[in-house]
């Protein structure tokens, strides 16, 4: 059974989330603060975390940073307050996969949960091991090694890398990547792709300013050169 960890200090909201997710067939655990939520995720990593950013004690930002520093690539859906654009951006930069703004509709949240889990389960159509330069990608464990050393990629960074690998050197437009990796409609305009490409280059390229593998195709998009 798919497991979801909800880290939320508002008891009523946590109850509502748990109830609706269990109706959909998920196994749900709830932690009322960041410290207990992080401990739970480390001890028994769930398939997905729903994380409130405004938590007492250890806030959601620090929980998210700790999860990614531990190399836990599980998808994280963050809950943000209305109008707090800076919180959304900071959460995404720390490795969140998606966000929902409070107050939110149950159907919207369930759709985002399903989309994140579906992308996490996708086999990717890759070989058992994919290589380019000093990089090795192991789809079965969603692991990426650089020179034999594990690289901590956020889930969206990994999904973006896989989307480029699947094309075997062909160009992927920003629209293609927004649809495939983030599930956004084609008409959505976003710098999310560019930001994540920059993060991938910083982690995987010898010289991120002059990349050899993750290349920009002017006025078109990106491609991966082996």
Image (spheres, helix red, strand yellow):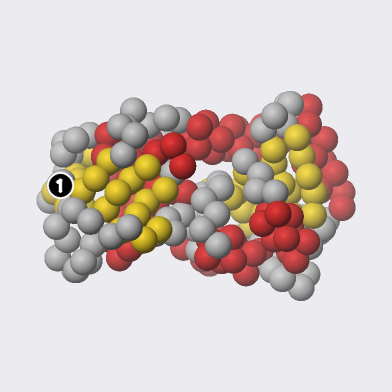
Tell me what residue is drawn at x 34 percent, y 28 percent: 125
**Would you say residue 147 is visible in this rendering?**
yes
Q: Which residue lies furthest to the front in this view?
A: 148
Q: In this view, does 75 lie above or below 209?
A: above
- Counting from the top left corner in percent of width and height, residue 78 is at 62, 53
Tell me what residue is drawn at x 46 percent, y 63 percent: 93
- Residue 58 appears left or right of 136: right
Q: Is mark 1 on a helix, strand or loop?
A: loop
- Counting from the top left corner in percent of width and height, residue 35 is at 75, 66
Instruction: Classify mark 1: residues with Cα within 10 Å, few (<14), some (14-19) or many (20+).
Output: some
User: What residue sits right under mark 1 in the picture?
Assistant: 225
The image quadrant of residue 180 is: top left
- Residue 71 appears left or right of 45: left
- Counting from the top left corner in percent of width and height, residue 18 is at 80, 40
- Counting from the top left corner in percent of width and height, residue 182 is at 44, 41
Nearest the viewer among 28 and 80 is: 28
- Residue 27 appears left or right of 137: right
Q: In this view, does 139 lie above or below 148?
A: above
The quarter of the picture where the N terminus appears is top right
Number of dots carrying numbers: 1
Tell me what residue is drawn at x 23 percent, y 56 percent: 134
**Would you say residue 92 is visible in this rendering?**
no
């Amino acid at each position: 059974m798919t497991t979801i960890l909800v880290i939320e200090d508002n008891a009523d909201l946590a109850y509502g989330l748990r109830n609706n997710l269990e109706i959909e067939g998920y196994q749900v655990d709830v932690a009322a603060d960041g410290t207990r939520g992080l401990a739970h995720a480390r001890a028994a990593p769930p398939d997905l975390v729903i994380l409130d950013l405004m938590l007492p004690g250890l806030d959601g930002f620090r929980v998210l940073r700790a999860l990614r520093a531990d190399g836990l690539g599980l998808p994280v859906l963050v809950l943000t307050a209305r109008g707090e654009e800076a919180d959304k951006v900071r959460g995404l930069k720390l490795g969140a996969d998606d966000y929902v703004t409070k107050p939110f509709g149950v159907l919207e949240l369930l759709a985002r949960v399903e989309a994140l889990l579906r992308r996490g389960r996708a086999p990717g159509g890759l070989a058992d091991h994919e290589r380019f330069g000093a990089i090795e990608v192991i789809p079965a464990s969603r692991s990426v090694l650089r020179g034999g050393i594990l690289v901590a990629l956020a889930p969206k960074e990994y999904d973006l890398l896989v989307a480029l690998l699947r094309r075997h050197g062909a160009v992927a437009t920003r629209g293609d990547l927004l649809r495939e990796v983030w599930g956004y409609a084609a008409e959505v305009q976003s710098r999310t792709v560019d930001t994540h490409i920059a993060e991938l280059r910083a982690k995987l390229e010898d010289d991120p300013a002059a990349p050899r593998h993750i290349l920009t195709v002017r006025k078109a998009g990106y491609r991966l050169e082996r």
